[in-house]
Image (cartoon, grey):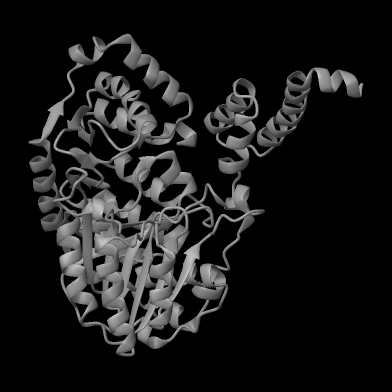
Amino acid sequence: MIDFIQQNILFSLLIVNYIIAIGTALFIILNNRNPVTTVSYILALVVLPFIGLLIYFFFGQEYRKDKMFKRKKVFDNKTVKKWENKLLLNKFRLENYEDDFLGNKVNIVKLLQNNQKKPLTFGNDVKILINGEKKFESLFEDLKKAKHHIHLEYYILNYDKIGSELINILCEKAKEGVKVRVNYDYVGSQLSGEGVKKMKACGIESFPFMPVWFPNLTRKLNYRDHRKIVIIDGKVGYVGGVNVCDEYVNPNNTGYWRDTHLRIEGNAVKSLQSHFLLNWNFVSEQEIEIIDEFFPQLDDCGEVPVQISASGPDSDYPHIMEAIFTAINGAEKYINITTPYFIPNDQILTALKTASRRGVKIKILVPKTGDSWAAKYATNSYILDLLESGIEVYHYCKGMVHAKTMVIDDIFSTVGTSNMDYRSFEINFEINALVYNKDFSKKMVQIFEEDIEHCDKVKMEDWLNRPLNERLKESFSRLWAPLL
């Protein structure tokens, strides 16, 4: 037997591979996951010997049922509950808003309030920041005014030109006595040892989100903190698509980068704060003392209602996906979507197609080239479905569009970190601001129309006549869509 194995080493390894693959496939099936995701992983196990096993063990394991976060230690805190209870709207008041300005969009508010206990907050001022240069100009100005604390959470925090400028400001504030806490994703960021040492030397607390050192590599690599938020003194918050990276600042040497971020001042910042504290407890392995200064009493800063929704494997439900699903199903006039990756699950795709066929005008803007070969072709594989249902698709040609936005019916908008894909809906830790305001929606529509001026509209005739090799790439990429 030993001689046979030595003489047929490759064949023997294949047998071992498929024994393990069969056991893994049975485990995946017993988990009762999304059938599309299940089939994708089983397909990888069958057609990609050895590689399929690596794909599953690195990317296929779920955390949602593990409850790895100590959520209640934050959300049961008296200070958090005090402001949450104060801002939470009861059923009667929500019904009044349904008759007033929200209409059926009140269903989105109810969904998140019931499932996530996230209130619709009032008294907010919200500014739209186009691209990295506007975001960092505003952010740096606010950081320099900080008096008590600065909290940052980023998927990409690089120690490059813009990153070092940010860290320099944080160090200056830390030396002034401002408490600075930084949470950065271990996989997404390129924060050199020099950057980490500099922050530590200045008294800044910083922790990486889920480092992927062995032996925990296989359990952690797939689940990343994709959020980009900043909270300053519990009064000013930032959320959106712009990471801390030179690539996001125009002009640069890598081409034009189109993105959208928000600056929020008001009660919605309290929701951003609570989610930061939740993750901070996890990455620091501490239980942070929650003090009143994290949730200060605020005068009305504006008139914009905002609701913050976050989701991730630690949550009971995919809150952001469910909010988007509810918004699409409630659309009556139009839906404008901008996303760098359009790889929807069946629920979102069906909701969009049926909304279009009942008369809702839908436009979807995606990059023509993109920054990922697989994501580009997976996105393109859905275009024919969309066109056949009357949905207009636009390819952004000026550069990379990375904004994650949606506007519906002159009243509802969402801006945040969540892409329109499986990974954002089910795997990554994401956070979005949901804005219910006519003036804000009007500005978002204007920005969308300006972006369309830099687009090619996809025409049915041209799309049907695209080369066969393009179709093959699309079909191949779509097979792996749940894994991208």
- Looking at the image, residue 225 sits to the left or right of residue 363; the answer is right
Q: Is residue 128 among what the camera can see?
A: no
In-front residue for pair 2/85: 2
Q: Which residue sits furthest right?
A: 1
Seen in the picture, residue 254 relative to 417 is either above or below; the reply is: above
> What percent of the width, then of the height, locates residue 67?
60, 59
> What percent of the width, then of the height, locates residue 284?
53, 72
Q: Is residue 283 among what the camera can see?
A: yes
> What percent of the width, then of the height, locates residue 124?
21, 70
- Looking at the image, residue 378 sits to the left or right of residue 391; the answer is right
Seen in the picture, residue 416 relative to 397 is either above or below; the reply is: below
> What percent of the width, then of the height, locates residue 168?
28, 75
Q: Quadrant of residue 355?
A: top left
In-front residue for pair 471/103: 471
Give the residue displayed 33% in from the left and 62% down from the top. Answer: 159
Give the residue displayed 73% in from the left and 21% down from the top. Answer: 10
Q: The C terminus appears in which quarter of the rendering?
A: top left
Q: The N terminus appears in which quarter of the rendering?
A: top right
